[in-house]
Amino acid sequence: MDDFIKIFKALTDKNRIRILKMLEKKGLCVCEITSVLNISTSTVSSHLSALKEAGFISDTKDGKWVDYHFNRSSANPVLHQVLAMLPGWLNDDGQIIEDGEIIKSADREVICSN
């Protein structure tokens, strides 16, 4: 039951939902996520830790960046079901649409060099 609670607790924060919806589109590094959410890097890192602990995301090293992305290989059936449903959620929400547009046009080299 603890894993079940951890999964749903991770979904109780607006910024974590926004992060998941962004990661649904593509893998992103901390500085890209920070620039979209317009919150501190430490807060983004905290949100990423909660999502990773719940099993929603994993990370991979990409040159000088660490990319975060959906953990599609989870064996947890509840997590697998939630991740499968997430692409159908909130697609008409203005904030989610705006976030998606920002990450589409974002240039990692520019964002992460600041």
Image: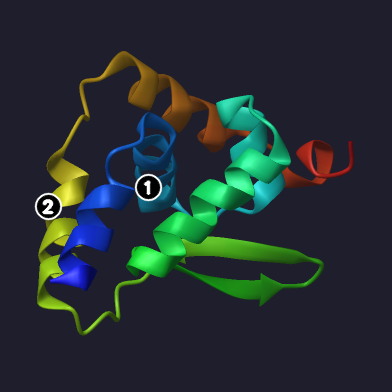
Most extreme residue toward the front is 2
Give how far across and how far down residue 107 sits, in percent. 71, 39
Placement of the N terminus among the 4 image quadrants:
bottom left
The residue depicted at 21 percent of the width and 70 percent of the height is: 2
Depicted 71 relative to depicted 104: above or below = below
The secondary structure type at the circle numbered 2 is helix
Residue with the mark numbered 2 = 85
The residue depicted at 38 percent of the width and 19 percent of the height is: 95
The secondary structure type at the circle numbered 1 is helix
Q: Which mark is residue 20?
A: 1
Most extreme residue toward the right is 114
Residue nearest the observer in this picture, 17 or 23 = 17
Depicted 42 relative to depicted 1: above or below = above
Q: Quadrant of residue 112?
A: top right
72 relative position to 8: left or right: right
Give how far across and how far down residue 38 sits, in percent. 63, 24
Q: Which mark is residue 38?
A: none
